[in-house]
Amino acid sequence: MAPHGEGSEEALVVQDENRKPISSILIIIAMQTEAIPIVNKFQLKEDLDSTFPKGVPWVRYHGFYKDLRINLVWPGKDSTLGVDSVGTISASLVTYAAIQALQPDLIINAGTAGSFKVKGASISDVFLASDVAFHDRRIPIPVFDLYGVGLRQSFSTPNLLKELNLKVGKLSTGDSLDMSPQEEASIVANDASVKDMEGAAVAYVADLLKVPAIFIKAVTDIVDGEKPTSEEFLQNLAAVTAALDQAVTQVVDFINGKCLSEL
């Protein structure tokens, strides 16, 4: 997220922070299936004495990898239905609570997403989002319409992009797995390459609390393809998490020992 005016005291603080080596990263993931391979890769341990308010299902894993302290948070299972607490509300809440409790230097929102054959995407492709926006907050009133879209740039990482073989595209977020005609029009207007259910919510909170955030999304389904989205998503979820795990590992390895300004 972009800093404020270059000459302001706040901007000088931001510039100073950008020159310090990154020591703490927060990985936010929506689903247990997406989280567990990364937890295992970095040998993270579950926090049994929860950092979060009593009674919430949110789960934190933590540990050290090379020079980095890693916290991974996912919203847990819905207490009534027992399914992953996906969507923008849970994502916003856990992002806010985790930033407040853990004070990370950088947020990585990692997860699976839909993409589009018109954008040249294939199953298991991994995208680094350049921008994030909502596609289901329709407020047809001047200026409120822009607020509804909520367009935000992700933290700029030109060196990371140069080093790793990731696709780049805009990310569009909504609270439904499928896509209504109105949402499709908004996704086209957003020029989105990937579609998820959390990213723009994480971006909103990260921007609010001035924590830089990047977004790594692995493709489970081709939204404009032949198969129903829900069928293709479930069919590919387990396999695509391997591509997500590999990409997150590469990103974390690249981040290690670097300052924000070196990304």
Image: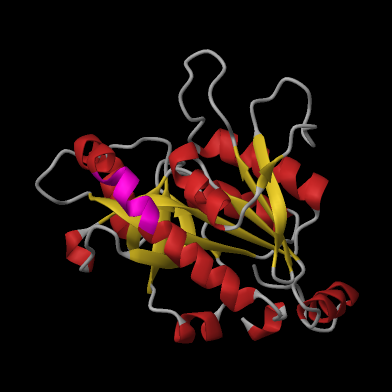
Q: Against 244, is 198 above or below?
A: above
Helix, strand or loop: magenta stretch? helix
- Residue found farthest to the left: 226
Specify the quadrant of the image occupied by residue 229. Answer: top left
Q: Against 226, is 78 above or below?
A: above
Q: Position of residue 114 (x, y in %)?
A: 30, 51
Specify whether 187 is left or right of 102.
left
- Residue found farthest to the right: 9
Q: Is residue 153 visible?
A: yes
Q: Position of residue 225 (x, y in %)?
A: 13, 51
Q: Which residues are magenta?
A: 236-242
Q: Residue at x 48, y 50 (%)?
A: 37
The residue nearer to you, when weighing 210 against 107, is: 107
Q: Is residue 147 visible?
A: no
Specify whether 151 is left or right of 54.
left
Which of the image's four quarters has the C terminus?
A: bottom right
Q: Position of residue 12 (x, y in %)?
A: 86, 80
The residue nearer to you, when weighing 17 against 79, is: 79
Q: Residue at x 26, y 46 (%)?
A: 236
Q: Residue at x 77, y 33 (%)?
A: 52
Q: Position of residue 63 (x, y in %)?
A: 72, 54
